[in-house]
Image (cartoon, rainbow, N blue to C red):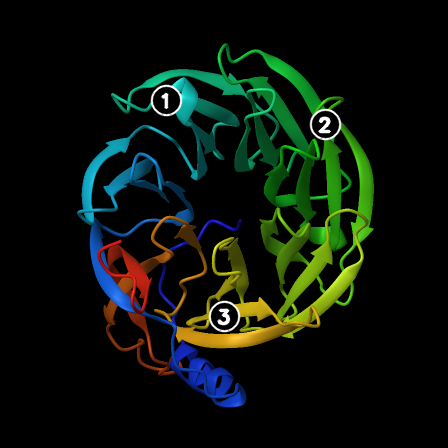
Amino acid sequence: MRMQRVIVGVVGLGLGLACWQAALPAAEGPYRMLTEIKVGAEGGWDYLSVDPAARRLYVSHATKVVVIDIDKNTVVGEIAPTPGVHGFAVAPQLGRGFASNGRDNTAAVVDLNTLKILSTVPTGENPDCILYEPGHQEVYTFNGRGRSATVFDARTGEVRATIPLPGKPEFAVVDVKAGRIYNNIEDTSQVVAIDTGTHQVVATWPIAPGEEASGLAIDLAHHRLFLVASNELMVMMDSTNGRVLSTLPIGPGADAAAYDPETGFAFGSSSDGTLTVAKPDAAGKLTLVQALATPPRSRTMTLDPRTHRLYVSAAGFTPGPPAAEGQPQRPRMIPDSFKVVAYEMMGTRGR
């Protein structure tokens, strides 16, 4: 995903949020805000990832990965240095984690017990999304400017393959039983399917009417992919043949997607301050469940499938000084903090 830069210039987001929510049917619940977890100072951010068994949330933040205990909602450690980190993947059975270091063109191999970096693995240019594939115990980095995927052994760090891709890769998901990894190719508005045994692209599908998708989630039971596209659509696709099954309008600046296999909810977060909760109806059409208000610029999020809680990265802002004399007097906001906002399903507290 695009690294979220915490910079001056939050203009008109409140108006955009109000207009978007007004355009949607009234939808109260099932989600509400639970708490804010203070993380620290300003800095860029990107993916979040949950380890449900270890009860940890990993949050990329500038040059480190912040580790949060999601039962206590407190920061318990950090992994550094990870220059320009985009994402973090875990291999629980190996006791290892992996960070994609966008500035260094490397992936860091991390001991999950000590949070120490054990080694680094060279990747293609600007590794973005990072994924652990448990079937072959391999790690995939999806290299944005490299237009490729680097595959390495999760135990040894040995690079096993470099997979050329037809454009700039974004998020990816895995179906171990099918032996497939699915990856959004943002600039060509396509999804590719990669065979995990041969490390080859075996299918390329257009996402029309969606354009330039970033976030991607998967419903393994029903073989569905959920994509969030830059032209304000959530796209539901058949993962067996690439057929687009349904679409749903979402907010502008969409970036992250998630799916909850227990509730059947699909999620898409947008930078206008909305998080769309959707669900296929009996006829298989995507329907709106809720337009959840989130802080402006909160484009990245993840789901804890055990508690059904959503975690959203966000920055805090304060009003900045007025523009210099003779310059347009537009509202200016200055970042002053970074946090993760947690949302819960009503009736699930204490799970």
Marks 3 and 1 sit apart, C-alpha to C-alpha, by 33 Å
Q: Residue at left 58%, top 24%?
A: 123
Answer left or right for 264 relative to 311: right
Q: Position of residue 62 (x, y in %)?
A: 35, 42
- Lower position in the chain sequence, tag 2 or tag 1: 1
Looking at the image, is 266 positioned above or below residue 203?
Answer: below
Q: Secondary structure at mark 2?
A: strand
Quarter-wise, where is residue 202 in the image? Answer: top right
**Type of the residue with mark 2:** Ile
For discs 3 and 2, the disc positioned in front in the rendered view: 3
Q: Which residue is mark 2?
A: 163
Looking at the image, is 131 positioned above or below residue 152?
Answer: below
Can see residue 249?
no
Answer left or right for 191 relative to 55: right
Q: Residue at left 38%, top 56%?
A: 308
Q: Secondary structure at mark 1?
A: strand
**Type of the residue with mark 1:** Val
Q: Which mark is residue 276?
A: 3
| Camera-side residue of 156 and 55 | 55
Marks 3 and 2 sit apart, C-alpha to C-alpha, by 33 Å
